[in-house]
């Protein structure tokens, strides 16, 4: 089903997408290529369109204009679950756990439905992901007993259960203490070392700087800067967007 | 291993239940217990079927009466046209109910929460109006049904219907249990908790909701199919009575929807209370009692009887039978 992409082709190609809500243009002609294995930071002030962009990539929203191509396949019209099966997983800005399930069962959903090879029993795979995330001791806990940082980690663990090629982390560090931020950041970096491409939306600049190989800054639905982290931070328009003129 | 043993216990229980029902029809002479018991069994089947969509998936369907009435009238029409035996009537009702579930699901399952519920109420009104104007099955005035001769080993038609409804209960419960323990059950549970998160985790939410709606619809229509034979009569306003919807929903919620046993317990509790009150006080008090019990449970035990019995089910819905 997935055509073999050229080895150096980008993993994800966002082609000139425009998304409007009524008269409001949330994304205006956005194009960007994400390379395989890249750690990509996405920044911008509130309301600049970051979450809308990743909603268009993960399938929660469909753009009116433009295309999303993943591994050489046009996925613009696919519903989210088919994108998840092709290897796009995400976490949510406000954690959205399956509340009636335990932490382990939350992961089992992804393992059950993302159709990955099951040479190992699913529970073992789920446990190994939880161990990896430092949540093994919480496996049979209810999600409403988790702390904020644990919830964030659980969301990432659940996304990992889909066995993603592309992981989108939507402000996984919002509201965490600085040591917790480092903890989650280390996790994300270590996932990136396993050939998982990661798009990270974040407001915490130190985290973005440490994590990203490239950073893109959105403002009012437009790309105002794209490049190496230091370069983007030094960009005058980026500083204006954040600090105001 | 554990699962395997649970299955043995379950099927042994189902067999014992059916054997007990069968021997009861052979031993007990008085017809009344079967007449009353039929209604309770019918409500168990309805509540269990309802909870597949309403409980597992969290889509509150107010159209139980639509599916029930469609079951009744499929049986009536088929019987009048061809004199088909009861088994065929029930099977046909299940097929029609499933088809209706598919059509309705396709149209309404994209709506969330209260909007879905309202759409399902409208469904019953539409179909009832159609049947009221369908002369062949008696229209608004209803239709008398002449029961065919009863089959061995039963000595009365009501006893046979009692056994048939018991069989439908076993079928409904086994399907509900299968779904609960399967991938489908986990997917439904996930989408009930959070539909977008479920989609993004790979769960084909629309497909699963459709499957749940079709199975639920088929089982409700099947449970309704023998009703005309039971009453020897059918008319649109009783076949499409909203009380079927309210009862099925109340029984499932009072029992608890996280586990298939919940609707069974709820239907037994409410169904037998209703039968008792209908005999001792009046059939109007039923509705009052239903309402009061629903309020009490919603306030005091939102997870139903099973939530009270096993606190673990407050947390998890999937799992062991």
Image: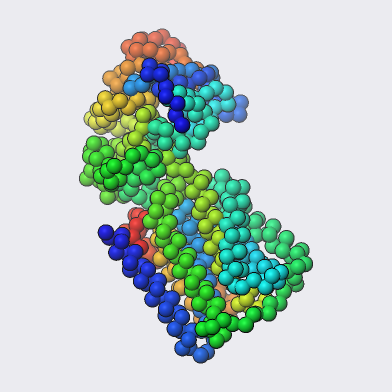
Rendered image coloring scheme = rainbow
The residue sitting at 53% across, 50% down in the picture is B210
| Viewport quadrant of the N terminus of chain B | bottom left
The residue sitting at 51% across, 52% down in the picture is B211
Instruction: Give percent across and percent down for residue B218.
Output: 55, 60
Q: Nearer the viewer, residue A109 or B27?
A: B27
Judged left or right of residue A159, residue B98 is: right
Q: Is residue A5 above or below residue B140?
A: above
Q: Nearer the viewer, residue B22 or B242?
A: B22
The residue sitting at 38% across, 12% down in the picture is A227
- Residue B57 seen in the current view: yes
Instruction: Give percent across and percent down for residue A30.
Output: 50, 19
| Viewport quadrant of the C terminus of chain B | bottom left
Q: Nearer the viewer, residue B88 or A68?
A: B88
Instruction: Give percent across and percent down for residue A127.
Output: 25, 43
Instruction: Give percent across and percent down for residue B89.
Output: 61, 68
The residue sitting at 32% across, 12% down in the picture is A230
Judged left or right of residue A17, residue A39 is: left
């Amino acid at each position: 089903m997935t055509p073999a992409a050229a080895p150096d082709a980008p993993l994800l190609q966002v082609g000139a997408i425009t998304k409007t809500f009524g008269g409001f243009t949330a994304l205006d002609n956005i194009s960007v290529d994400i390379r395989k294995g890249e750690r990509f930071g996405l920044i911008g002030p509130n309301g600049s369109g970051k979450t809308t962009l990743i909603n268009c990539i993960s399938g929660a929203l469909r753009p009116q204009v433009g295309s999303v191509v993943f591994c050489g396949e046009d996925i613009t019209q696919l519903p989210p679950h088919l994108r998840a099966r092709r290897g796009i997983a995400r976490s949510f800005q406000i954690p959205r756990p399956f509340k009636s399930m335990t932490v382990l069962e939350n992961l089992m959903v992804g393992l059950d439905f993302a159709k990955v090879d099951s040479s190992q029993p699913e529970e073992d795979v789920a446990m190994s992901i939880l161990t990896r995330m430092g949540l093994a001791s919480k496996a049979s806990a209810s999600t409403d007993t988790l702390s904020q940082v644990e919830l964030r980690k659980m969301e990432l663990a659940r996304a990992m259960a889909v066995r993603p090629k592309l992981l989108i982390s939507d402000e996984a560090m919002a509201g965490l203490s600085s040591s917790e931020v480092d903890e989650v950041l280390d996790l994300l970096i270590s996932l990136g070392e396993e050939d998982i491409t990661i798009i990270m939306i974040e407001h915490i600049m130190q985290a973005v700087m440490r994590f990203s190989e490239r950073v893109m800054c959105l403002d009012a639905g437009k790309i105002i800067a794209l490049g190496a982290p230091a370069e983007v931070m030094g960009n005058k328009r980026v500083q204006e967007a954040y600090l105001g003129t | 291993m554990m699962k395997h043993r649970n299955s043995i216990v379950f099927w042994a229980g189902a067999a014992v239940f059916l054997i007990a029902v069968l021997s009861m029809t052979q031993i007990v002479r008085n017809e009344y217990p079967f007449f009353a018991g039929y209604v309770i069994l019918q409500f168990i089947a309805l509540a269990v079927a309802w909870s597949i969509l309403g409980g597992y998936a969290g889509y509150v369907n107010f159209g139980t009466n639509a599916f029930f009435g469609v079951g009744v009238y499929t049986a009536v029409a088929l019987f009048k046209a061809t004199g088909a035996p009861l088994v065929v009537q029930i099977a046909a009702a299940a097929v029609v109910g499933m088809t209706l579930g598919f059509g309705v699901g396709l149209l309404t399952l994209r709506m969330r929460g209260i909007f879905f519920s309202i759409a399902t109420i409208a469904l019953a009104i539409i179909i009832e109006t159609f049947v009221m104007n369908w002369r062949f099955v008696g229209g608004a005035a209803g239709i008398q049904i002449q029961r065919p001769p009863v089959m061995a080993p039963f000595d009365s038609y009501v006893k046979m219907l009692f056994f048939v409804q018991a069989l439908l209960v076993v079928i409904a419960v086994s399907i509900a249990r299968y779904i609960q323990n399967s991938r489908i059950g986990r997917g439904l549970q996930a989408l009930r908790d959070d539909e977008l998160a479920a989609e993004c985790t790979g769960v084909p939410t629309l497909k699963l909701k459709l499957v749940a709606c079709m199975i639920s619809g088929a089982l409700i229509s099947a449970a309704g199919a023998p009703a005309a034979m039971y009453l020897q009569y059918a008319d649109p306003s009783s076949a499409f009575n909203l009380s079927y919807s309210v009862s099925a929903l109340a029984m499932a919620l009072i029992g608890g929807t996280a586990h298939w046993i919940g609707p069974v317990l709820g239907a037994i509790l409410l169904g037998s209370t209703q039968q008792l009150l209908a005999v001792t006080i009046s059939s109007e008090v039923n509705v009052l009692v239903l309402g009061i019990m629903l309020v009490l449970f919603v306030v005091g035990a939102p997870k139903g009887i099973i939530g009270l019995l096993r606190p673990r089910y407050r947390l998890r819905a999937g799992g062991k039978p």
